[in-house]
Amino acid sequence: MAALSAASARPVTLTDTALQVSGLYKAYDGQAVVAGVDFAVPTASCFGLLGPNGAGKTTTLRCCLGLTRPDAGEIVLGGHPVPAGAQAARRRVGVVPQFDNLDPDFTCSENLLVYGRYFGIADATIRSRIPALLDFAGLSGKASAPIPSLSGGMKRRLTLARALVNDPDIVFLDEPTTGLDPQARHLIWDRLKRLMAQGKTLILTTHFMDEAERLCDQLAILDHGRVMAEGAPRALIAGHIEPQVIEVFGDDVGRWAASHHDLGERLEVAGDTAFFYCREPAPLLAALADEATNSGLRYVHRAASLEDVFLKLTGRDLRD
Amino acid sequence: MRGSCFALPRPGLRWLPVWQRNFLVWRKLAFPSLLGNLADPLIYMLGLGYGLGGLLPAVQGVGYVQFLAAGTVVASTMNAATFEALYSAFSRMHVQKTWDAILNTPLSLDHVLTGELVWAASKSLLSGGAILLVVALLGLAASPLALWIVPLIFVTGLAFAALGLIVCALAPSYEFFMYYFTLFITPMLLLSGVFFPTERLPAVVQTIAGWLPLAHAVQLARPLLLGQLPDDALAHLAALLAIAGACFCIATALTRRRLLK
């Protein structure tokens, strides 16, 4: 772990803000994809960018890395203005892309060596870091394994190790656990927490709300190219939604819900499920206890989650 | 992005790791790769040279196989650079997303493209150089002047790599490359004096053929292999370098438009 823990020994340089985005605007063919986005990521925190497909997350990330030139707005990444200083900024940045782009012709350690060279790091330095990086990724025995022999979870972990080859201050992760099984997902979460403990700044996009709730200090919910809400996960739940949710399912739930809507502050019906959002659940629970068995309804009572906030802000319509 | 798409390439010196990456892949597959690049053109050269050549009188004062040798060297240089800049570069850009991975590092797209350009030319140097070596071992090189063909191979490789990178930037899929081969590479192979002297062609076609990049390479390589100094050597060299430079600028602009939008 020598190579990785070296980061915590290094004094925090530059600013307290790892990434500052102001007034970001980008349109394609007259259609605004990012329509005035502002947010700031404090150094050594984990920031989540949430949003349905097509909300503008990827374009925002590409702008932050200097890969897409915005039509308007200012970005400062690690103290460097982007895109003008993007190449310098990327020296101190690691990126875990959404889709695997490891080099299939190389072994695990060759992937790390070749990638480290792109940062101008000497071969000897990279080679000395490789064992710790592979260990961090849980791939210690796989130094000479060819990429096609790795599972999806192993590839994602190797991609994470590759993003750390330059010992970055800031790590971007674009949907880091999409397509992974629960075991692999938990392992990635564990590693991301370790990186946070080392003082690295994480910026991740996801549409897994439990992931965002678990990892992020701050998050922004993005839709139609705008920030719909921003804050700490708990604060967003407290500020945007009633604390209790009762989901009622059954064939004729729509009619039943309509006649009982006054038992919750807010009611949403989607398909054969009615979502009652309320502060005081007792009256509704009593009504359900009386009537549910006879009317063939079932229900779940739970605390409100980030997913409820997300759905309230971005709607229940499919985005493809 | 429009303005900066058309800015001149800024290759810097940091493209070397991109070249090294491709070299490392090649080293793993070097033997079959070299064998493939060597066998095919040599079979053609020896088959046509001795088989067809046996039926022919002297061509431009030399035996047909001697005439054909220079053309074979530059044509296989062209093929090697073209294949690398089309199929291999496209697979790194579009299929494996290797370039996307590199663009997340401090390297720019200009570094990636310069690395690919120089790599394709280097690979063509390996192929063309190997053919030249066999040609020399067969006693078909008249004098040490033939050594000048080595840098010529590299310059020819640069020109065809740059041309190929333009096609790569425009390609929606691998199938697209067939157009380039059918409409450009194959006609050029026949019009550039590789298999027969261009004096046999109608005047109009001769004029057009004189402008083709492969023709410049043939005009330089053939006399050098026969132990003579080429006519208009500097003009031909300048033409190849100009083609390489102009095409690389176009390829850079097109690839920026494709990937950095």
Image: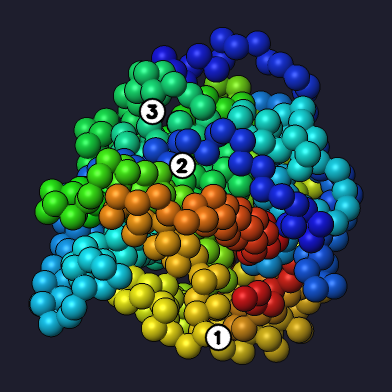
Give the answer, above or below, for where A142 lies relative to B182. above
| Tag 1: amino acid | Val
Marking on residue B18: 2
Mark 1, secondary structure of its residue? helix
Instruction: Please state the horizontal and vertical placement of residue A144, each as a whole percent of the image.
Output: 22, 37
Say whether residue A181 is visible: no
Residue lying at 30% horizontally and 50% vertically, measured from the top left = B227
| Tag 2: amino acid | Val
Same-chain check, marks 2 and 3: no
What is the distance, in whole Å, between disc 2 and disc 1 at their CAs? 43 Å
Marking on residue A133: 3
Q: Where, quadrant-wise, is the C terminus of chain A in this rendering?
A: bottom right
| Lower position in the chain sequence, tag 2 or tag 1 | 2
Residue lying at 73% horizontally and 75% vertically, measured from the top left = A268
What is the distance, in whole Å, between disc 2 and disc 3 at their CAs? 22 Å
Same-chain check, marks 1 and 3: no
Marking on residue B204: 1
Q: Tell me the chain of label 2.
A: B
Q: Tell me the chain of label 3.
A: A
